[in-house]
Amino acid sequence: MANITQAYYKMFILDELADKKTAIHRINPIVKIMVTVIYLLMVVSYDKYDIIGLMPLFFYPVIIMSVGDIPFKPMLAGLAIAAPLVAGVGMFNPLLDRNIVSTMFGIGISAGMLSLLALLVKCSLTVLAALLLLATTGMNKIAAALQRLHIPQIFIMQLLLTYRYISVLMGEASRVYYAYNLRAPNQKGISSKIWGSLIGLLLLRTYDRASRLYQAMKLRGFENQFFGGCLDKLQKKDIMYLLGWTGFFIIVRFINIPMLLGVFVTGVIK
Amino acid sequence: MSHHLVDFIDVSYSYLDGNKAIENLNARIHHGEAVGIVGANGAGKSTMLKLLVGILMPEQGEIRLGDLPVTKKTLSIVRQTVGFTFQDPEDQLFNITVYDDVAFGPRNYGLDEKEVEKRVVSALQTVGIEHLMHRAPYKLSGGEKRAVSIATVLSMEPNVLAMDEPTAALDPKSRRRLIELLQGFKHTKLIATHDLDLVMELCSRTIVLKDGRIEYDGPTAEIMKNTLLLEQCGLEQPLMLQGCPICRQK
């Protein structure tokens, strides 16, 4: 909570990163969305205990980050928000699934622990992929690409307005927090006694602000429609990008590269 | 058909709590006129402008832009004709770049991208902020945000400008730039403000509101000398007409 203003400004970092002109940024947004969707499907298709099999999929975010010149810190911030939620979902796995499937340094590793770990790895990969799509494309171009893919307007508008509403919510939260803090300098955080009223106030304030924003949109002819702007035509490089990554995902999905490497390395050592 | 006349005909409006915000308001604003709308807090200034652009609908009476009544059916044309800027420019800026914000209106009216670009560049040039085109609105200063908010309505090429507290929270230099900018506009202007010095410089006519009713409607120069009426309406003379606080000379 203390860094709520920082978090507010960090929100816009992804939009700013999307303005870069690297090779990844120049790829057609439609293709980037398709690659991301295929990647997400691949990640979630792995068995719930298969951590090793997931490892080669880390290549994708690493390569996008390095070629797209995307710093890791904002990605980590996004992961930090999502990881506790996923950990909360999977935290009971070690208690419910206690079969020991392996030992490491004399410590038994239960199937539940493995599945929790796999869940966290899947969470990291999927969240990273989504954040990287945003950081290399930008929300407006994503919306334009979704429109080109014939996704119904209502879903696109929901996506755009929710994305904007988050910044309104955080902006108001930051103001409320400062106003509170200035009159309670010796407190750490916000007293739990007023959480209820403060959240109520925050919702009312954001509702008011969102209403004014909506009025401003209506005054400029907004009728729940989205005009996506221009998207470039698909080029050879876009098709290559799509085929390249799809090929890579299929290979790592059906050929266990880490195991092959392990066999190869241990074979060489023998 | 002329949309340039703005008519408030016996307009009344109450808020949901029953509080009368505007009562039997009658005013006719002519083409090219610059009208200052002044009054104490809660006098009905913002409500009057919101009624003009159809954010609020009168419970009694009628508002007309020339031959065109302001109704739910005509809102699209009304909002193309009247450009409204909010008290807080941040309420008007919700896109990632200044360009997208200024292009938002023209795009919504279905103009092709070439025409949109032409209008955006022209609006930004008019307010002198072409260099901010690719900047993120949330990173701009208060004065720059205000200029962008004006450009967002200019890109719709309105005939009438309705501005709610345009100089609120502006530093003196930004305020001066804004006044010079508005002096150059040929649009019909309705400016709701507490800044009576701004009204003195920009508006030949002033409407003074008190508790939702018009207390005065006439030449600015006259009302600004009427200290008694100003005081009764919760106002005071513009600083430029008050004596020097040190030597007391005017």
Image: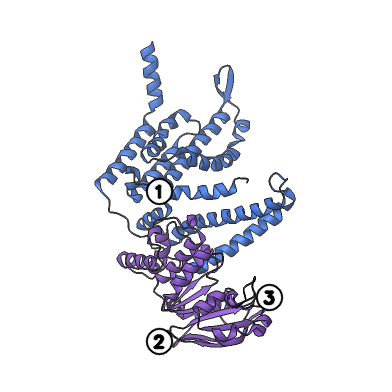
Chain colours: A blue, B purple
Image point 72% across, 45% down: which residue?
A187
Find the residue positioned furthest to the front.
B247
**What is the spatial separation of the Cα atoms under label 1 and label 3, in whole angstroms?**
46 Å
User: Which chain does tag 1 point to?
Assistant: A
Location of residue B149 with respect to B226 vertically, above or below: above
Q: Which of the two marks, 1 or 3, is nearer to us in this view?
A: 1
User: SS at mark 2?
Assistant: loop
Disc 1 and disc 3 in contact, CB within 8 angstroms: no
- Figure quadrant of residue B119: bottom left
Which label sits on residue A18? 1
Instruction: Indicate the amino acid at tag 1.
Output: Ala
- Residue B75 in the image: state x and y as whole percent: 47, 78
Does dot 3 land on a helix, a strand or a loop? loop
Residue pictured at 35% horizontal, 51% vertical: A30
Amino acid at circle 3: Asp
Disc 2 to disc 3, C-alpha distance: 37 Å
Residue highlighted by disc 3? B17
In depth, the one of A102 and A231 nearer the eye is: A231
User: In the image, B224: left or right of B18?
Assistant: left
Q: Is residue B55 visible?
A: no
Q: Amino acid at mark 2?
A: Ser
Above or below B240: residue B66: below
x%, y% of residue A152?
42, 60
Q: Which label belongs to residue B2?
A: 2
Apparent side of residue A204 relative to residue A151 in the rendered image (left or right): right
Q: Seen from this angle, which residue lies furthest top?
A: A270
